[in-house]
Image (tube, coloured by chain):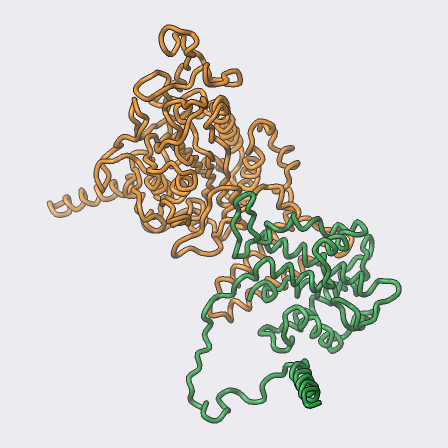
Chain colours: A orange, B green
């Protein structure tokens, strides 16, 4: 080997190594893999991170931790009261909680984390997310799209639309959005990626029900097959074939839905009977979670998003804030349990959890202080939770001020030292799937530190 | 007197002008018109087809079903334990109507579940209309029927007989002559008609084979992309 070839081999090896790094992979051009599934959850109403993902259990500065004086602790599985009262003297000041720590690693939670703690090794927590808003609508849009509202209008596609557009176009239902703040705005989006926005799973069963008293299922399928051909032919003659092609795919989708008796997917009683681990009476979105699992198992949807709430606790309803979080996180823990044993529909050797990516966001967080009505108001900081095989588990990134709970700079980004923002979180999710974030996001920068 | 004459004349002219005329294919093409031999013609589409608003779909549906109110239609569609229809409220969201109670915006693009709802509603209309038009006692005169405004023999019709009847249905649902359809639509629907009749199992069905054949043709038209888009 001469000097030139030696240098070339080093350069080549370095380049190959660099290509394998998260940062480089994050900006790789071609979109990869269509075996991935996505679950997006909106903790609607703005959650209190001081009892959940970014906990505080001591008075410091503005911080007034949740305590036995302000929280109903009885239903909380992970609540262990501190032995000294908050003011150090009077029991009437209330007792705060012991921080909840996994067996190893840097993660630390409040008692709201519930049973999700047992999956700590796959949790990626992003704290100190600067929201620059305390408006529910704006915060919701900012978390889901990475853009603040333009007046009252969303300015970009939501994360479920992004993923459906990149990975779900061949899917029966590319994106199903159950009260999630989905938006289909922007250039270069395929209309097949429009999220199917619905207010509840059960309401769709009526559309799929068919009478057995008139024509047979085969006769109905014959009609749909004819319409499918009509749409295909009309598309081939059209200058703008997208819409007719879309209808062709939808007719084929309908044939599949009817053929596979997909009505079960939207039937509340069927879902409750099959996914029995959820506590349907206390976990308000459990039917949505069960629907998510069933639709992934049947390879019917690429992306399911739903809202869980409401966490908007300005008054004494704050007493239940940690319980709401416990229910949400318990529900996610149960989903993970199911995903760990359910085979991937197109990769039978794999489990669904190896290809499912979950992002949980909220509008923003709640104030560090307790207000006169014994609740917490709106505050422009936030946390997000990511559970994905493409993210580093048992990891926390970003931070908030110990006394004011405001976002602190997390690292030096390309535009300088600053806190994490929602577009950074979304860009990380997008780039983890091998897509250039600029395809969908005007702002934000992928965070290689949290990517595998 | 003059005023009366003028009024009568005007009314006569108006009635002549409004008299329906059967559309026919043009006898000459545009470039055969003097002065148009070399005139450039922009025939490109300027916009993709759009979804008919759900309100217009529902209004058309009600009109086709005899011009009843939504609730009257619902009552008739659910009568007799047909299982063809639930309630309008069960379909409004799937049809794309906004729901201000749950902050759901209007859906302006089709999706698989909307297409499923079109199927559900289309089947309900065609099957119930067939029962009312063809199976009522006493029999409904052809000109009083809602959908099947032609005589329906007890046995399957041949291709020519089908084409005449199909042309009426095609015009009713899609608004133009079947022979102008851009696809080989009449032949395609005739095949569907025959196939449905051939495979129909009368056991447990309220339809004869011929009924099922015409219902399938009706469903294919009310669920057609040209019915949903404009």
Q: Which quadrant of the figure has residue A49?
A: top left
Answer with left or right where residue A198 lies relative to residue A112: right
- Location of residue A13 (image quadrant): top left
Rendering coords of residue A386 (x, y %): 40, 34
Q: In front: A272, or B94?
A: B94
Count of residue discs: 0
Q: Residue at x 63, y 57 (%)?
A: B118
Q: Looking at this rendering, what residue extends furthest in the left direction?
A: A3
**Left or right of A163 on screen, residue B148:** right
Assign the C terminus of chain A to one quadrant of the image: top left
Q: Residue furthest right?
A: B138
Q: Nearer the viewer, residue B224 or B189?
A: B224
Using the image as rendered, state which of residue A14 and residue A319 is in the foreground. Answer: A319
Which residue reaches farthest front?
A: B1
Quarter of image, res A106: top left
Residue B28 x, y percent position in the rendering: 55, 89
Residue A202, image x, y percentages: 62, 41
A432 left or right of A287 in image: left
């Amino acid at each position: 080997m001469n000097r030139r070839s030696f240098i070339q081999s080093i350069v080549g090896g370095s380049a190959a190594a660099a290509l394998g790094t998260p940062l480089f992979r994050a900006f790789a051009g071609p979109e990869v893999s269509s075996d991935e599934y996505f679950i997006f959850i909106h903790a609607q109403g703005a959650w209190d991170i001081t009892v959940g993902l970014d906990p505080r259990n001591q008075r410091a500065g503005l911080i007034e931790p949740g305590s036995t004086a302000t929280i109903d602790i009885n239903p909380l599985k992970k609540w262990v009261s501190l032995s000294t009262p908050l003011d150090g003297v009077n029991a009437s000041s209330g007792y705060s909680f012991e921080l909840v720590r996994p067996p190893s690693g840097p993660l630390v939670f409040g008692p709201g984390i519930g049973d999700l703690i047992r999956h700590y090794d796959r949790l990626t927590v992003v704290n100190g997310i600067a929201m620059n808003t305390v408006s529910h609508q704006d915060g919701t849009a900012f978390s889901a799209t990475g853009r603040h509202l333009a007046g009252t209008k969303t300015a970009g596609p939501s994360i479920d639309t992004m993923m459906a557009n990149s990975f779900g176009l061949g899917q029966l239902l590319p994106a199903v959005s159950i009260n999630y703040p989905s938006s289909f705005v922007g250039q270069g989006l395929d209309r097949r990626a429009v999220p199917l926005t619905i207010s509840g799973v059960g309401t769709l069963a009526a559309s799929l029900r068919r009478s057995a008293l008139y024509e047979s299922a085969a006769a109905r399928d014959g009609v749909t097959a004819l319409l499918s051909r009509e749409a295909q032919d009309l598309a081939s003659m059209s200058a703008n074939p997208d819409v007719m092609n879309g209808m062709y795919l939808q007719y084929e989708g309908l044939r599949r839905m009817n053929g596979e008796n997909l009505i079960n997917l939207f039937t509340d009683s069927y879902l409750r009977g099959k996914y029995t681990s959820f506590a349907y009476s206390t976990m308000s979105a459990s039917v949505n979670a069960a629907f998510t699992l069933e639709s992934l198992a049947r390879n019917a949807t690429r992306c399911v998003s739903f809202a869980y709430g409401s966490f908007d606790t300005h008054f004494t309803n704050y007493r239940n804030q940690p319980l709401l979080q416990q229910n949400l996180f318990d529900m996610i823990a149960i989903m993970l349990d199911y995903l760990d044993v359910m085979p991937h529909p197109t990769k039978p050797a794999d489990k669904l959890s190896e290809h499912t990516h979950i992002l949980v966001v909220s509008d923003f967080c709640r104030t560090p202080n307790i207000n006169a009505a014994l609740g917490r108001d709106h505050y422009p900081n936030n946390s997000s939770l990511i559970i994905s095989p493409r993210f580093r588990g048992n990891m926390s990134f970003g931070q908030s001020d110990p006394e004011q709970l405001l976002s602190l700079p997390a690292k030096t980004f390309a535009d300088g030292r600053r806190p994490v923002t929602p577009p950074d979180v979304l860009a990380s999710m997008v780039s983890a799937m091998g897509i250039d974030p600029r395809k969908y996001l005007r702002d934000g920068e992928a965070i290689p530190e949290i990517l595998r | 007197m003059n005023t009366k004459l003028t009024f009568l004349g005007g009314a006569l002219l108006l009635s002549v002008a409004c008299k329906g005329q059967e559309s026919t294919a043009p006898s000459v093409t545009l470039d055969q018109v003097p002065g148009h031999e070399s005139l450039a013609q922009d025939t490109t589409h300027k916009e993709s087809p759009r979804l008919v608003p759900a309100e217009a779909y529902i209004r058309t549906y009600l009109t086709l079903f005899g011009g009843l109110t939504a609730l009257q239609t619902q009552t008739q569609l659910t009568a007799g334990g047909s299982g063809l229809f639930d309630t309008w409220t069960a379909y409004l969201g799937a049809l794309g109507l906004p729901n201000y109670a749950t902050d759901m915006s209007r859906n302006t693009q089709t999706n698989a579940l909307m297409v499923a709802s079109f199927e559900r509603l289309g089947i309900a209309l065609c099957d119930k209309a067939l029962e009312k038009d063809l199976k009522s006692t006493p029999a409904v005169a052809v000109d009083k029927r809602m959908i099947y405004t032609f005589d329906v023999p007890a046995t399957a019709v041949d291709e020519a007989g089908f084409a005449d009847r199909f042309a009426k249905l095609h015009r009713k649902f899609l608004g133009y002559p079947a022979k102008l359809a851009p696809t080989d639509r009449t032949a395609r629907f005739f095949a569907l008609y025959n196939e449905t009749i051939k495979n129909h199992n009368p056991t447990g069905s309220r339809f004869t084979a011929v009924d099922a054949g015409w219902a399938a043709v009706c469903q294919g038209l009310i669920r057609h992309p040209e019915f949903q888009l404009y």
